[in-house]
Image (spheres, rainbow, N blue to C red):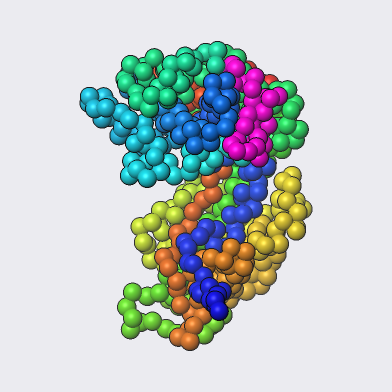
Amino acid sequence: MKVETAWVSPPQAIGGLDHLGTQAPCVLIYSQLLPGITNVTDRARYYSFYPWLIWSFDQRYAKDDEARFVEFFRRADCLFTLLSERHARKTDRDNERHGVAMVGRVQLTQALDRLEAGEYLNLSQYTSQESPLRYFKNPMGGLSQYYAGTLSDLKLMDASAKPWIKYTKELGAPLAEQVDSNIQADRFWKVVESGTATCDDLDALSELCACQLSHSVGECKTLVDLYFDRNDSYEQEGVQRRRSLGLILNLTRSLPDGHDLTESMFRACTYSGALPGETPWTVPESLQPTLACWGIYQRNDLLSIACQAVLGLALRELEPQAAASRMAYGSVESFAEAFSNGAAVTAVAQDLDANKVGDFLDQLVVSMPPLASWENDAHEIQLALRMMASWSRGDDTRTILQLAVSVLALLACRDVPSQTPYGGVAISPEALADYPINLASFRVRVEAWKLMSFSAFTADLVTWCLNIHLRVALRKLRYTGRSTFHLRPSERGLEVVGEIPPPANTTPRFRQAVQILRDVGALTRDSSKPNRQTRLSDTGAALMEASSA
């Protein structure tokens, strides 16, 4: 008789992400504000290249050989990256324009090095799943791994089609035809069929480089129509994407000389509503709700990283380097009580002059920098940056805890009770039920903290973070069968499991949105400036005006 015992095996332990569930509301927010662009859809031309690739295959080959399709697809995927990288080397060597974020680039740039050195390039060396030089593990390369879901949502491709993903006749096929009219498709497929590529081949196909999108007029216009939903095809999602892209373009135009468009700049300006130098950032009325929602995103992100830092500190205190100094704690509450009465917490209370939390917050309301003064060292934007840098350096508990508490205190002081915590963002209480540390629960917690001593507040904060981590990890275990616990009760007391996770920001798709705006010609670099500051092109200025209408 066969006996199954797998159900009693310990669950597989993995590092996991979002150990407090604090990042999930941030993801919900930016997913609403930038739909159709994700953290892995880095280049605009993949939105047209993949529909063209499958459409063009259908024009040339029978549809009954799945193995051939997969092999040809993988060769074509490699060829696209190789010709973009080659174009960079033959022109301005500006990776931002050409090869950055192309699929399999790290492996394939080495292949190009060898080709340019005179060696033979066999594409199958990089497409074979058994090859140590394999460019990508997923059989359908970057399409399945990164772009399929998004292209399906945008109605360019049908991810449910069998035996392979198909283009849509309504949108995907016309876009593919526009690509086809501007490239040497026959030569492209000749290289794919032969499985070999020369430098002359790559040079001849340079019209397909990611940087050449703006020169393919019809193709580029179709993609701009898609991103900015100029045909009103995507309902509210299209409106939100257009407004967020318009907001990025507006920020680009508004930034003074010497200040480039970066994610940290975007975070600070959307959170504060101010440009560098405390200059108010004035946006059109139509973009003001979008700006406010991005401010809420950043507020939630600050709450998230501060609580992650507290979790990390607690775990670090539970795992001393010297075994002789290890204390056994039977519960989260007993550890939190001991931690809150320790020397580090006492020192932070003295540093902040915060014996009573309510009195401390009252004083902070008077002394804190204005929201617009985000360059001030005492502003929460700067404190959060120092906190993460401090964690990376391995600074002591006193230093990191003071920064984390200061961020939380400033968030509490800037809260406006008459406004709902998530404002115009469509997040229901039900959606937050699985993520107990959020802006709404934080507001409630602050009211309780105001009545506490600093020691009691710290104990409650640590207890909150550790218990929520256990709850979140238990939920993940239930639904995935994998363990993401970093804290475990045992007969020896609480034990730390695995590496302690560092505090980290969420990634709000900003970098991908900016790269796409560069690819379609809306943003450009000012080569006359030492920092090559990002500027609006004429196309970008027109799109900004249209998105604000």
Count the labels in the image. 0
Residue at 34% x, 43% y: name it: 131
Q: Depth check: 344 or 304 in front? A: 304
Seen as rendered, the residue at the extreme bottom is 491
Residue at 33% x, 44% y: name it: 132
Residue 148 at x, y = what percent? 59, 38
Q: Is residue 207 left or right of residue 219?
A: left
Tell me if residue 132 comes above or below residue 337 in the rendering. Answer: above
Magenta span covers which residues? 152-179
Tell me if residue 126 comes above or below residue 4 in the rendering. Answer: above
Q: Quadrant of the C terminus?
A: top right
Q: In the figure, residue 170 lies in which quadrant?
A: top right
Tell me if residue 362 comes above or below residue 322 in the rendering. Answer: above
Residue 449 at x, y = what percent? 64, 69
Q: Depth check: 355 or 77 in front? A: 77
Residue at 48% x, 57% y: name it: 503
In this view of the protein, can residue 41 be seen by the observer? no
Magenta span contains residue 175: yes
Residue 291 at x, y = what percent? 66, 38
Residue 487 at x, y = what percent? 50, 73
In this view of the protein, can residue 22 be seen by the observer? yes
Q: In the figure, residue 244 lies in which quadrant?
A: top right
Q: Depth check: 286 or 142 in front? A: 142
Q: Quadrant of the N terminus?
A: bottom right
Residue at 65% x, 35% y: name it: 158
Magenta span contains residue 493: no
Seen as rendered, the residue at the extreme front is 1
